Amino acid sequence: MKRDLRYPLKIRAVWFDEDSKKVCWINTLKLPFQEEVYCSDDPGRVAKAIVDMEIRGAPAIGVAAALAVGAYSTRISGLPLGDFKERVEEAIDTLWRTRPTAYNLFYALKRLRRVLEEGVAGGVEPPVLSRRILEEALEVMWEDVESNIMIGEHGAELIPDGATILTHCNAGALATSAFGTAEAVMRVAWYKGKRIRVIATETRPMLQGARLTVWELVKEGIPVTLITDNMAGYVIRKGLVNAVIVGADRVTREGYVVNKIGTYMIALAAKRHGVPFYVAAPTSTIDLSSTVNDVVIEERNPWEVKHVLGRPITLEEADALNYAFDITDPDLVTAIITEKGVVYPPFRESLERIMGGR
Ligand code: MRU
């Protein structure tokens, strides 16, 4: 089932284990100190892994949810069709309710629900239908891998030799099935011999930049410098950054970019200082049906803000806000790098064109 990929698959956040027929993932909460792998065919367990952020990053969430449904369908394929349908629907609903912002989750689960519904309508028995569901889940995963490679190819063209790229959060292999989105651009530019450097923000409160982006780039041999989130404006102002590249959790039809909290401030600084601000995202992140007003910004437990790596940093009784994502206006975005090509403003038209009306 291996595809012919043009670059080595070095890090995988989520995959399907053919022997055990389970979805496996790296527990990203333990990185960079421990590489802990879990495997499961229990949708409840995978849902918990997504909520707790063992699995995180928009494409990785979508792929993990799809593979969880595929693995579970395989396990219960001996049930009568009515029971099978009910259980698979429950699994989809459980995974659907995990995190509200990343569109990839809903994109992937909608695809699986369609396969289930078509199979049930056609009277396809569970042993065959479960195989179809698993095949669709694997297709979601491989499409993500291939999209990331193409994002890398298109994006690398935009990066001059010697460029310093600032990125926020982790839009790397650990946020996808492989390669990443923003990190795919860095990887391909690096593989093609461009001498890039990366500045990674630490990304409070969950430290995806410090823990995950730095880990990935060090493994890759790409020079990376860690900064605190509040340094981004100054390093941009100082002229230390030639381009910003971030991922996205959702892109609306008008071109608003929903991404990790803090992205908006970086986009503002980039605009002010004439630094290009690129968003690398597969079309599975683009939601033409939603406008900026429909986007649900996840609010997580304030505990995450009041602790760093589990240790308290403030008074227990302190109030704290924990918005996980923010919204960047389309006029701050230079271009969106997708697997189908690079799209420029006005995004309403260019996104519709690239999505083929999807
Ligand atoms: O809360 P997270 O870690 O799931 O947020 C991740 C991000 O915001 C990423 O930038 C986004 O999902 C794109 S990943 C290719």
Image (spheres, rainbow, N blue to C red):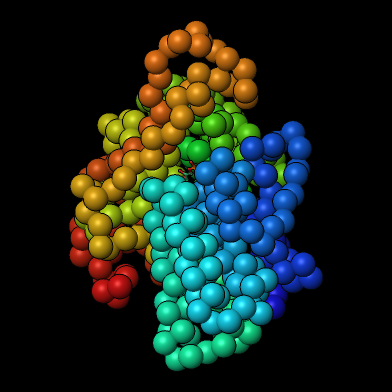
> Picture coordinates of residue 30 (x, y %)?
69, 36
Q: Nearer the viewer, residue 209 or 23?
A: 23
317 lies above or below 267: above
Q: Could one spot residue 143 in this view of the protein?
A: no
> Picture coordinates of residue 279 (x, y %)?
39, 50
Residue at (52%, 69%) from the top-left corner? 88
> Picture coordinates of residue 304 (x, y %)?
51, 26
Residue at (55%, 20%) from the top-left corner? 307
Q: Nearer the viewer, residue 65 or 192?
A: 65
Left or right relative to 150: residue 223: right
Q: Nearer the viewer, residue 347 or 224?
A: 347
Left or right relative to 61: residue 348: left
Residue at (53%, 68%) from the top-left corner? 87
Q: Quadrant of the C terminus?
A: bottom left
Left or right relative to 322: residue 253: left
Q: Quadrant of the N terminus?
A: bottom right
Residue 132 position by quadrant: bottom right
Q: Nearer the viewer, residue 52 or 156?
A: 52
> Picture coordinates of residue 258 (x, y %)?
34, 45
116 lies above or below 60: below
Residue 104 position by quadrant: bottom left
Q: Could one spot residue 39 in this view of the protein?
A: yes
Q: Residue furthest top?
A: 315
307 lies above or below 54: above
